Image: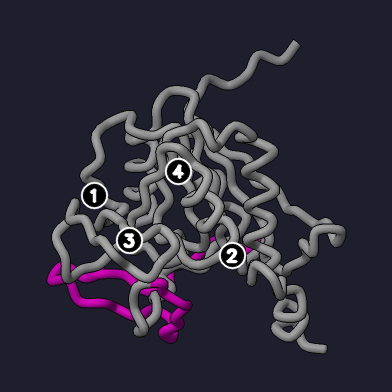
Amino acid sequence: MSKPDFYRSLQCSECQSGPRQRALWFALNRFRPKWRELSVHESSPGWDLVSRRLTAECKNYTASQYDPNLSPGEIVDGTRLPCKKYIVQNLERQTFADESFDLVVTQDVFEHIFDPFKAIAEIARTLRPGGATIMSVPVVRKFNPSQRRARLTGDGAIEFILSAEYHGNPVSGDGALVTVDWGYDIAALLARASGLWFIMQTFENMDYGIRDECNQILIGMKSPLPTLE
């Protein structure tokens, strides 16, 4: 059986979640079990288990989507998404005030950003002290260094370094261009760009149907390093 077929075989027939989404859900409840009480920003939510639960159960939930055809900060209401409405945001240049959120969640977003280092610095800026970001990112390069697939030129055109690759996009049928193939160095790179301290965990638990070639979850925290005693 091929790996894509195996991955699809673990798709939940009830909630439609995949292994990586369940891994993020597992990490969210382990590292921020009181997430329902927090101020949460989720970038690019879809129809999956995590987005639906955050929307329904989080007391102070904010959804955002990137749409180059709309103005940053514009509110889009009455969408078909479970979040019902979202704020247009470019993660590299967010309109949110400093220290707006306790938690920022991204699911398979950071492989689609042209400047992920600006984006993670912006996430750090919008986090309150003691806040955290939890993200799933397909780490396809493993022990090899991360590499860029596409970038923007000075005049705003897209330069393709590798062949164009697209993933699903909850607000566009054109898909989302993959800009970076990440390796395990992602945690160190994001930490250096943001000042957050990161851990990366690989979740493997067949009791919850969590098995995937790229099931790494990153947790970045805006707090002093703990004292080891």
Mark 3 or 1: in front is 3
Element assignment for label 4: strand
Q: CA distance from mark 3 to mark 2?
A: 20 Å
- Where residue 29 appears, as percent x and y from the top left, is 66, 41
Q: CA distance from mark 3 to mark 1?
A: 13 Å
**Left or right: 155, with 138 as reference point:** left
Q: Amino acid at mark 1?
A: Arg
Q: CA distance from mark 2 to mark 4?
A: 18 Å
The quadrant of the rendering that contains the C terminus is top right
23 vs 82, nearest the viewer: 82
Answer with mark 2 or mark 4, whichever residue precedes in sequence.
4
**Left or right: 217, with 127 as reference point:** right
- Asked whether the residues under the numbered discs 4 and 3 touch, taking CB atoms below 8 Å apart as contact, a structural biologist would say no
Q: Which mark is residue 93?
A: 1
Total marks in image: 4
Q: Residues within 10 Å of mark 2 (few under 14, many from 20)?
A: many
Element assignment for label 1: loop
- Residue carrying label 2: 138
- Residue carrying label 3: 65
Q: Magenta residues? A: 143-170
